[in-house]
Image (cartoon, helix red, strand yellow):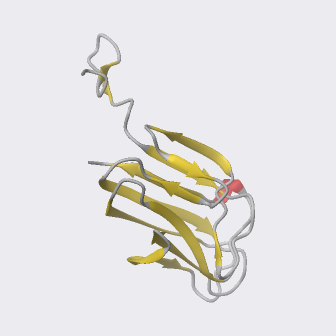
Amino acid sequence: GTSGLTIANSTGIVTKPNVPYGQASSNAKTVATAVVNLNSNVVSGGGMTVDQTNNRIIVPVAGLYMIGFHELADIAGYTEVIMRKNGTAIAGSRAQTGTSSQYGNFGAHMVISLAASDYIDWYGQAGTTHNNVNYNNHYVYLIG
């Protein structure tokens, strides 16, 4: 079919309306040994599921995905967040702040191969993140 691409107007701009994507913010502090809440500013499409009950983003098709997040540390101490695939930490997916980084931004981004129905979540390994949706975002989108 032809629904995979759309020519938006006479200038030839091409859009891909069915590409899976999802993002969400948290309006609650993430504390050590807890999964980041994905309960605010939820945007998704192309079959992507943002599961607000289990705080994860579930992919609809196999492929290469860009995943990532940014957070704001809420304490003047070490804060760390880990991206996880199906509940298991992904190698190279940790981001952390230094010991004096109250209100310091930090984040991580990577490309990962996922199978249909795999999920990504974010886990607070140490410290505390800020509880304001203006300072955090978590996303997954298909790149190919």
Relative to 80, residue 131 above or below = above
**Residue drawn at x 64%, y 80% as measured from the top left:** 101
What is the total number of numbered labels drawn onto the structure image?
Answer: 0
* Nearer to us in this view, 99 or 119: 119
Instruction: Say if 2 sits above or below 19 in the image.
Output: above
Seen as rendered, the residue at the extreme top is 10
Q: As displayed, is residue 67 above or below residue 129? A: above
Say left or right for 45 vs 78. Answer: left
Closest to the observer, 86 or 18: 86
- Residue 83 lies, in percent from the top left, at 48, 71
In the rendering, at what x and y percent does residue 7 appear? Answer: 30, 18
Q: Quadrant of residue 30?
A: bottom right
Identify the residue shown where x is 71% and y is 84%: 76
Nearer to us in this view, 69 or 42? 42
- Residue 58: image location, x then y, percent: 48, 54
Residue 115 in the figure: left or right of residue 139: left
Direction from residue 10 to residue 24 in the image, left or right: right
Please name the residue shown 37% across and 56% down the image. Answer: 66
